[in-house]
């Protein structure tokens, strides 16, 4: 059974940084494309960033481009999201997700980690 567990959330002031991490267990990590999503207060869930199976290709939402970096370590079965220059509008529960088939359709989800950015 595939499980995803996020960590690294917390409270940070605007302009600060946080690094989220997600570890996958239950199957070979390199068989999954990975992504981060978020859902802010009273907002719909939105896609934040994605990374290909090998890690060679990354994609970002316009709202985080240039501030966030997604990376993966296939040896450790982890995917990270480095978040810099955080803004209050980045406040959300952040979820990692795994896909066996494409970068647009995710099969497995973590439980989420809260990120709160104070102004």
Image (tube, rainbow, N blue to C red):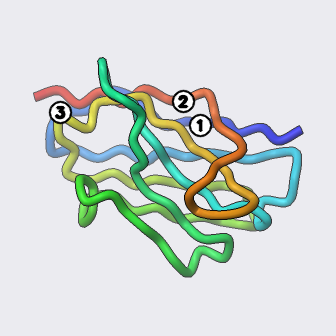
Q: Does the CB distance between marks 3 and 2 fall below 8 Å?
A: no
Is residue 86 positioned above or below 29 on the image? above
- Quadrant placement of the C terminus: top left
Q: Looking at this view, is 72 or 40 the one in front? A: 40
Q: Does the CB distance between marks 2 and 1 fall below 8 Å?
A: yes
Which residue position holds label 2? 112
- Quadrant placement of the N terminus: top right
Which residue position holds label 1? 6
Crowd rating for badge 3 (residues with CA inside 10 Å; few <14, some 14–19, many 20+): some
Which residue position holds label 3? 88
C-alpha gap between disc 3 and disc 1? 21 Å
Q: Earlier in the sequence, mark 3 or mark 1?
A: 1
C-alpha gap between disc 2 and disc 1? 6 Å
Crowd rating for badge 1 (residues with CA inside 10 Å; few <14, some 14–19, many 20+): many
Crowd rating for badge 2 (residues with CA inside 10 Å; few <14, some 14–19, many 20+): many
Task: Locate residue 43, reporting x and y percent.
Answer: 31, 26
């Amino acid at each position: 059974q595939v499980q995803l567990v996020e960590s690294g959330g917390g409270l940070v002031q605007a302009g600060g940084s946080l690094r989220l991490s997600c570890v996958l267990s239950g199957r070979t990590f390199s068989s999954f494309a990975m992504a981060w999503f978020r859902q802010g207060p009273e907002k719909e869930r939105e896609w934040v960033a994605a990374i290909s199976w090998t890690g060679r290709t990354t994609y970002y939402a316009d709202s985080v481009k240039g501030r966030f970096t997604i990376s993966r370590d296939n040896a450790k079965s982890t995917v990270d999201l480095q978040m810099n220059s955080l803004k209050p509008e980045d406040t959300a529960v952040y979820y990692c997700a795994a896909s066996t088939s494409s970068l647009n359709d995710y099969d497995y989800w973590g439980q989420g980690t809260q990120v709160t950015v104070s102004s």
